Structures are given as C-alpha cells and as structure tokens.
Image (cartoon, helix red, strand yellow):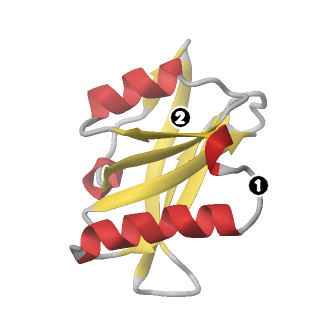
Amino acid sequence: MPRRLMGGLLAIVFAFAAGSPTLAETVVTRVNDHAELNQKWCEASPEQHYIFIMPASLFVDSEELFCNGVPYKLYRVIDPYDSYDFEYNIDPPFGKTGVLGCGSTAGRQMDLVAVNCGPT
C-alpha cells in the first residue's frame, strides 16, 4: 500500500480509536478539488461527524469555503510537537457555533489527508 494512502487510513483509524463517534455515525467523503470540497461542505449537516479525504494541496495557498455567506478558513501549520507533520484545519469564523469545524494531523510528505470534522 502506498505510504501516502497508508497515512490517511491511519488517521481514520486513530480518529475512531480515540472514542466517539463510531464509524457507523460518521460520513466518509472523498473530494478531489476545491469546487467539489465547497459543494460537499455546504451540503454537510453541522450536526453530523465527517471525515473528508482530500489532496493536501488544497491547504496550500487555499481559498476559503463559503456557505450561506459564512467563510471557513483552510490552512495548515507545522505541528509544534512533531516537525515532520502538518496540522490541517478548516475553521469557521471565531465565535460561530452550530457549524462544522475540522482538524487533523498528517505527515508532511502525504499527498492525501483525512480531516476529521464535527460540530463546533
């Protein structure tokens, strides 16, 4: 199995090993580009848990996601505890509740990342 795919799958396994939610309660969605991510993001329920599997490149010089006039910021930063990893995030505006927020960690060399999302 390619290393890039293995890292993404490990992120999914660790997400469920940590506790809730269960796999049966989580929607796993694969997107290939920003337009598809924006569409699926806007269709997502803020009360559901998701794992979005997507190219890591979507977080480089990224555009914001917009749903119902609400901007969500995509970004990655070097993990402060492990410089070989990036933290990948999709954040709603500060203080906005009742919407999705996402976070995950993956190796810096990964082409695909699995980002865990849930209600804020």
Would residue 72 appear left or right of 97 to someone viewing this image?
Answer: left
**Residue 102 position in % (x across, y down):** 59, 48
The residue lying at 55 percent from left, 66 percent from top is 13
Q: Which image quarter: residue 2?
A: bottom left
**Crowdedness of circle 2 by 10 Å Cα count: few (<14), some, many (20+)?**
many
Q: Are marks 2 and 1 in contact (CB under 8 Å)?
A: no
**Residue 33 position in % (x across, y down):** 25, 37
Label 1 residue SS: loop
Per the model, the C-alpha gap separating discs 2 and 1 is 24 Å
The residue lying at 77 percent from left, 27 percent from top is 98
Which one is earlier in the sequence, the residue at label 2 or at label 1? 1
- Residue position marked by numbered label 2 in the rendering: 72
Viewer-closest of 91 and 20:
20
**Residue 114 position in % (x across, y down):** 44, 56
**Residue 100 position in % (x across, y down):** 64, 35
The residue lying at 30 percent from left, 47 percent from top is 58
Label 2 residue SS: strand
Would residue 51 appear left or right of 84 to someone viewing this image?
Answer: right
Viewer-closest of 15 and 40:
15
Mark 2: amino acid: Tyr
> Going by the picture, which residue comes out furthest to the front?
24
Mark 1: amino acid: Ser
**Crowdedness of circle 1 by 10 Å Cα count: few (<14), some, many (20+)?**
few
Viewer-closest of 66 and 117:
117
- Residue position marked by numbered label 1 in the rendering: 20
Viewer-closest of 41 and 62:
41
Which labelled disc corresponds to residue 62? none
Rendered-image quadrant of the C terminus: top right
